[in-house]
Amino acid sequence: MEYIRKETAAVLVDLHASFPLHEKKLLVLGVSTSEVLGEHIGTNGSEQVAEAIFETICDFQRKHAFMVAFQCCEHLNRSLVVTRQTADYFQLTEVAAVPVRHAGGAMASYAYRHLQDPILVESVVADAGIDIGSTLIGMHLKPVAVPVRAQSPFIGKAHVTMAMTRPKLIGGSRAVYVVET
């Protein structure tokens, strides 16, 4: 589990270097603990892998004060586990379910049991995301997602895809996007 912690920490550092996370930013995480172990998504959920990733994320979160949402699997329509404080801040819509290993996934169920005052919400519009094992987090990112490359794009055996977001560029050939001083 120690290498999973180290790889998770490295991915977080890479994302933070490209897109600094702070108290007003929301990071969405989709995690297949099965894929981390080299198994097919949804077939071998692991509480130990979930714990290692969760604790590493929470340690990093305490240092940078951003908010986090853990995506459930498709059996709960990819709803997300957040703290009630996060839901209140972003005015998120609460839904009624409790994620468990076979309906929500190991990561989301672990987060639900270990976050302070957790709730399940229908969707988020996150500023950045980390997808560990092709869990498809794109629906929970702001409209213009920009890929972020990790120095090592794996946690365990799972491929990691990261994204940050930016505001939409509007206008045409005459539009100006940077104020010259």
Image (cartoon, grey):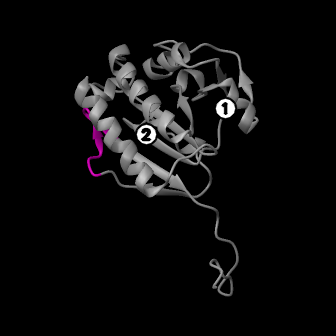
Question: Residue 134, how many percent across, how many down?
Answer: 40, 38
SS of the residue at dot 1?
helix
Residue marked by disc 2? 131
SS of the residue at dot 2?
strand
Q: Residue sitting at 32 percent across and 29 percent down?
A: 35
Q: Which residues are magenta?
A: 151-159
Question: Residue 57, how many percent across, how many down?
Answer: 43, 32
Membership of 155 in magenta stretch: yes
User: In this picture, is 28 found above or below 176?
Assistant: above
User: The C terminus lies in which quarter of the figure?
Assistant: bottom right
Mark 2 Cα shell of 10 Å, populated few (<14), some (14-19), many (≥20): many
User: The N terminus lies in which quarter of the figure?
Assistant: top left
Q: Residue sitting at 70 percent across and 16 percent down?
A: 96
Q: Amino acid at mark 2?
A: Asp
Q: Residue sitting at 51 percent across and 40 percent down?
A: 137
| Occupied quadrant, residue 143 | bottom right
Mark number displayed over residue 49 = none
Q: Which of the two residues, 29 or 22, is positioned nearer the viewer here? A: 22
Earlier along the polypeptide chain: callout 1 or callout 2?
1
Question: Residue 63, how many percent across, how many down?
Answer: 48, 38
Q: Amino acid at mark 1?
A: Thr
Specify whether 96 is left or right of 69. right
Residue marked by disc 1? 86
